[in-house]
Image (cartoon, helix red, strand yellow):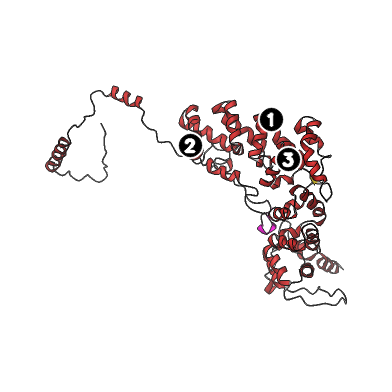
Amino acid sequence: RSWAVLALLLSSYGWNMMLPAGVKRPAPAPLAIRQRTNRLRDPETGYQRPVPKEADFALDIFQRTFPEVTTEEHILIQRWEDMVDVFQSPELVNQLIEDEPSILRWPRRTARNALHYLEIYLGEEEAKEAVFECPFLLTKNAKNMRESLPALINVLGSKQKLQEVITKYPQLTNVPIGDFYKAMGDMTAVMGNRQAALEVAKEAMQRVARSPYVSAVPGGYPVLIAIFGTLDEAHRAIAREPLLLKWYGENFLGRLGTLRALLGKEGAQAAVRKAPYLLLEENQRKSRKFELAFEAIENLFGTEKTREIVGERPELLALGWKLHRALRFAERRLGSREKVRDRFDAILERTGLAEHLHWERKPRPRNGLWTPKLRLPKGVPLNHGPWSPHTNPLGKGGPARGPWRDFEEDISEEEVAQMREDFPDEEDEVVDDPDDLDEDIDDLDDLDDAVEPAAEMPVGHSGRTVIL
């Protein structure tokens, strides 16, 4: 009886029960030596049917990309056949799966439903163009797309613009949905009173009311209008950083409050207009970064001058801890705060921070689109940049170290005068006639001929040049 129970458990749960705790199953074998499924059935008769030969390519790509996935083969084949029924071509489906194998990880009809809502809001041909340009769209939840796509059209203004945006930022097909009524509390927090919030949102509300779709917008859109001050400025920032539409409006308030505390209300608005990426979260403590960068510059220039510098170059706030460490190191290296202040731009060049600013200004996502095909569960590794504790050769807790090139100090006139006072007898001789210089050179040549060659230096001794 015990053997019968063991056989029943093994048949139900497989050989995973035989593995010790914490030991993973080995990756499945390549498709060429894997045992084919016998659970693929005809939906009408219920009899076993052969595997379509065209599906082998897609199964092989999927298995090699995700060897840890243990989804049964007949289920993967059913998902593949559902896509073939939609696109009417096994070759086109195999092309989509080759570009994005994670399509087969989602339940059957996920790709069909996603394409259905894309066709409703983009058109049949435009939807298929978008899908072949970005196959990752087929993995999105259709229920969320049904709400997000009309809200995005209300903001972007046209189907063509919507197609351009979602093919580059497919994560925007799942954005929080809201309206101006729900966002009025956050808009009031930004503007100071409800009347000012209504005034700044008036043009945008009239624009959405004229839309043929439901009067919904992404949840953060009304707050962005309040932050940037006008509808045109908000749309200019959204065109620069479309991922601003991904967040709730209240997500921006903490970083905006920190900028206002450092730069003032008008200064903060001017800064985010020039650098809207400062409002993005990006899994960073950005408020703390702003404070550290502002403190480092304020230590050199004072509060008012620092506000002018940051107002002209708000991207400096994105450096945060890196700028703080580099400037403190430069102050110790050069010996005074004044030298660092006079050579501020040169120090940015010599520490590598000026080059890193180009990375900070790049439109997001700076590393391109993340998909499961990249096999990076925590996302693309961060580019910490020079002078970050993560790139410190002495370790995160060690003294601040990073790229540095010393300045070539020129001898000033005061130092030359001091040297003349210290050595009054050693004055430079001025040669008035070039012929006299030629005669002196000839005398030196005669002297070299008269000197006997020096004896060879004994092994183990080294020569030394002494400058008197």
User: Which stretch did the figure color magenta?
Assistant: 370-378
Q: Where does label 2 land, which residue?
A: 346
- Looking at the picture, how far across and down is residue 262, in whole percent? 65, 30
Tag in front: 2 or 1: 1
Q: Which tag, 2 or 1, sits closer to the chain's start? A: 1
Q: Quadrant of residue 229?
A: top right
Q: Marks 1/3: CA distance?
A: 18 Å
**Residue type for callout 3:** Leu
Foreground label between 1 and 3: 3
Disc 1 on helix, strand or loop? Answer: helix
Label 3 and label 2: CA atoms lie apart by 39 Å
Quadrant in which the N terminus appears: bottom right
272, 201: nearer the viewer? 201
Residue 100, by quadrant, is bottom right
Q: Is residue 41 above or below residue 321?
A: below
For residue 342, which numbered disc appears in the image?
A: none
**Circle 3 residue:** 231
Amino acid type, residue under disc 1 in the picture: Lys
- Residue at image position (49%, 31%) is 340
